């Protein structure tokens, strides 16, 4: 199997979670050990500038924690509001189909630590932009953003780059 074969295991689910949404279901790809390994190897190529990986709940945890372990890096979870036990800072954001809030522990990152933010999908850019803001508010430096796929028609990359024009954003596939 090659990278394209692994990516081809992502299936589209129409009208989920709401009518008009074409959901990209990664679970068949994750269920295939060879495919998941290939994806992680490809994503690992983009971890060289990072000292820590931050994964966004929930599917960003899958890739982020695996990449951190594979590359000998620390992992920081960026969670939905109310899920972390210690003092947090939070950031609200818009989604393709609503709004939400994420948070991180106030001491999640060291000052100036280089952080790679990992998630499964770059859609409208709201979630990733909120994660970038949280990381910076903690005093860390965002080394880049890494996602499995990008929904290009939603222009999330554009939103992020309007605020952070020099930020490296990498996606393995754009749909």
Image (cartoon, grey):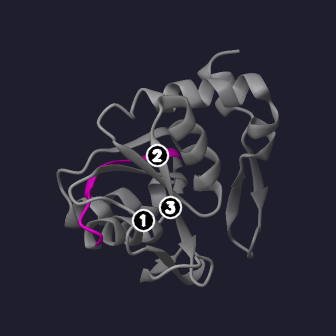
In whole angstroms, how far apart are the C-alphas of marks 1 and 3? 5 Å
Residue placed farthest to the left in the image?
166
In whole angstroms, how far apart are the C-alphas of marks 3 and 2? 26 Å
- Residues in magenta? 138-148
Residue 50, position as x, y percentages in the image: 33, 41
Q: Nearer the viewer, residue 4 or 69?
A: 69
Q: Which mark is residue 123?
A: 3
In whole angstroms, how far apart are the C-alphas of marks 2 and 1? 24 Å
Contact? badges 1 and 3 (CB < 8 Å): yes
Q: Which residue is mark 1?
A: 125
Vertical position of residue 128 compared to residue 168: above or below = below
Q: Which residue is mark 2?
A: 74
- The residue lying at 78 percent from left, 56 percent from top is 13
Give the quadrant of residue 33.
top right
- The residue lying at 39 percent from left, 47 percent from top is 52
Residue 65, position as x, y percentages in the image: 58, 46
């Amino acid at each position: 199997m090659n990278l394209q074969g692994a990516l081809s295991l992502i299936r589209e689910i129409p009208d989920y979670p709401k009518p008009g949404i074409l959901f990209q279901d990664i679970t068949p790809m994750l269920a295939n050990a060879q495919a998941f390994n290939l994806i992680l190897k490809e994503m690992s190529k983009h971890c060289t500038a990072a000292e820590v990986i931050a994964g966004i709940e929930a599917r960003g945890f899958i890739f982020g924690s695996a990449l951190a372990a594979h590359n000998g890096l620390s992992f920081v979870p960026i969670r939905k509001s109310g899920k972390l036990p210690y003092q947090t800072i939070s950031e609200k954001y818009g989604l393709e189909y609503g709004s939400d809030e994420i948070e991180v522990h106030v001491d999640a990152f060291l000052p100036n630590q280089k952080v790679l933010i990992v998630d499964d999908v770059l859609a409208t850019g709201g979630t990733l932009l909120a994660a970038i803001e949280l990381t910076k508010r903690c005093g860390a430096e965002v080394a880049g953003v890494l996602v499995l796929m990008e929904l290009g028609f939603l222009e999330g990359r554009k939103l992020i780059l309007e605020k952070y024009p020099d930020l490296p954003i990498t996606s393995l596939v754009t749909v």
